[in-house]
Amino acid sequence: MAYDLEEQEQLASLKAWWNQYGNLITWLLIAALAGYAAWSGWKYYERNQAVQASQLYDEVQKAVTAKDTPRIQRAASDMQAKFPRTAYAQMAALAAAKAAYDAKDLNAAKAQLQWVIDNGLDDEYKSIARVRLAGVLLDEKAYDDGLKVLSATFAEHFSGPVADRKGDILVAQGKVEDARAAYKLALEKTDEKNPARQLIQLKLDALGGANKAAA
């Protein structure tokens, strides 16, 4: 009987505890399960988005191979509309910008590059887009706008390409001394094994800065 009485007391204590805290615990468990379900659902959504985006990016690549500029632009626009938060959208925009530039459609090229700058999630792609946009603006003789684009913050490994592009714009503006300084900086920031160094050196030589650069 003592055992039965002790068991009944434990059961009563458990019921009292559950009456006080059971509802809270149930809601906490439901919230935890809902959170896990939401996280799992989001991960599935991300994977599904990446798969679909990769398939559409294949279309972009095929269009690039075929040099079908209108098709490239359509596929890139579809990518931006449907999968803007994927790396594929940024890659497609850069490919579309190059295709438009090669086709002498500078407005389309600028639009694609600006999309990457405004909407890109990856700083690498955004930096590439800025350097290329500055090049398009150079072709349009929008020199101040080009320099403004290059005034953004870049990762250290972009120092060489940025300085090189600045040098190009400064030469076009007739600012020889500033251009020479920019090309020297580009040389300093460009790895010796990088083929781009040869072109930068040629530009510097053309400004009469070869001896100074060697010093």
Image (tube, rainbow, N blue to C red):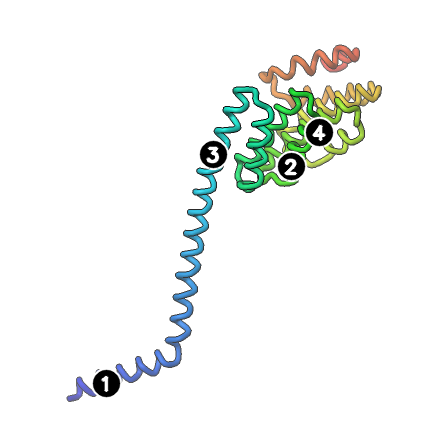
At label 1, the amino acid type is Gln
Q: Are marks 2 and 1 in contact (CB under 8 Å)?
A: no
| Residue 158 image offset from top left, x and y in percent | 64, 29
Residue ID at (71%, 11%): 202
Determine which residue is flagged by label 3: 54
Label 3, label 1: how many angstroms apart (C-alpha)? 64 Å
Instruction: Label 1: state its secondary structure.
Output: helix
At label 2, the amino acid type is Trp
Residue neighbourhood size for the residue with mark 3, other residues' Cα within 10 Å, grouped as few (<14), some (14–19), many (≥20): some
Residue 95 appears in the rendering = no
At label 3, the amino acid type is Ser
Label 2, label 4: how many angstroms apart (C-alpha)? 12 Å
- Residue 137: give its label: none
Determine which residue is flagged by label 4: 107
Left or right of 123? Residue 40 is left
In this rendering, the label closer to the viewer, 3 or 1: 3
Determine which residue is flagged by label 2: 115
Residue ID at (61%, 23%): 99
Q: Are marks 3 and 1 in contact (CB under 8 Å)?
A: no
| Quarter of the figure with the C terminus | top right
Query: Residue 121 lies in what quarter of the image?
Result: top right
Query: Residue 64 lies in what quarter of the image?
Result: top right
Instruction: Label 3: state its secondary structure.
Output: helix
